[in-house]
Amino acid sequence: MSVRVVAVDDHDVALAGIRSVLAGSDECSLVGCFPDVTELIAFLDSADAPVVDLVLLDLRLRDSSDPYDNVSRLRKRGLKVLVFSAMESPFLMRRAMLADVNGLVQKSVDVTELIGAIRIAAVDGTYATSDWASLIDSHPLEHALDLTDRQLQILTSYAAGMTADSVARATGLKTPTVQDHLNRIREKYSEAGRQGGSKVDLYRVAQEDGYLPGPLEND
């Protein structure tokens, strides 16, 4: 049975490529293309909407939507979601992975691999080949520190610009406790051979690890 696919991407060239690839496949059929998840959901809610098995989702959309929210909304509807993206942003990759995406595929893959990934994700529920593992391993987020939830909360707040006093007020902790957490975070980065001594250093490594958005995500 052919896998019924929809694509969510707002780049015309990418969509043209997807249309061409799926038009030439006996294993997959393209149901529709949408610039964002909101329009796709409106389509799915229409009375005459066809059945959809899998969504090809770009990470970076012009509506600046969060990949975590996009994947979560689609997964709650029972849809398989395969990220199809350039994978240049650790932050956006992490957000999609946290939402239990069914797999990630780089836009540079060949036609055979893309069709295979769609089939695997649609049938088995997870696309996780050795190439996919290599992609994750090559990304900075694979080498991110194992931080506790509290440490992550303090790191992202402090590195994003808040003072230790402000973080303390926001978390209900005392300022010395926040400082203790920051010192431990710095120690962890130092033990990992990474620079985290200054606030600027913490901001940089938090971006590298996908805990904070990079410059492109802030545009």
Image (spheres, rainbow, N blue to C red):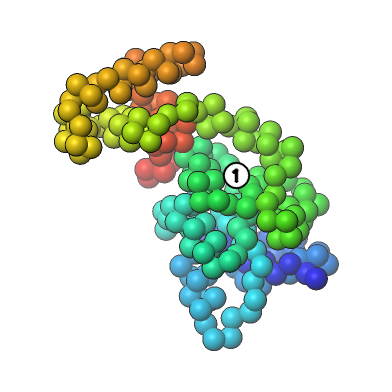
- Residue 169: image quadrant is top left
Looking at the image, the residue that sits furthest to the right is 26
- Image side of residue 198 versus residue 11, left or right: left
Residue 76 visible within the image: yes
- Please tell me which residue is depicted at 54% across the width and 46% down the height of the picture: 97
User: Residue 120 at what x, y percent from top left?
Assistant: 75, 55
- Please tell me which residue is depicted at 51% across the width and 78% down the height of the picture: 45
- Residue 6: image quadrant is bottom right
Looking at the image, the residue that sits furthest to the bottom is 47
Name the amino acid type tagged 1: Ala
| 170 w.r.t. 84: above or below | above
User: Residue 25 at what x, y percent from top left?
Assistant: 81, 64
Quadrant that contains the N terminus: bottom right
- Image side of residue 160 versus residue 46, left or right: left
- Please tell me which residue is depicted at 44% across the width and 56% down the height of the picture: 69
Quadrant that contains the C terminus: top left
| 218 w.r.t. 159: above or below | below
Q: Is mark 1 on a helix, strand or loop?
A: loop
User: Residue 20 at what x, y percent from top left?
Assistant: 74, 63
Residue density around tag 1, few if under 14, some if 14–19, many if 20 or more, within 10 Å? some
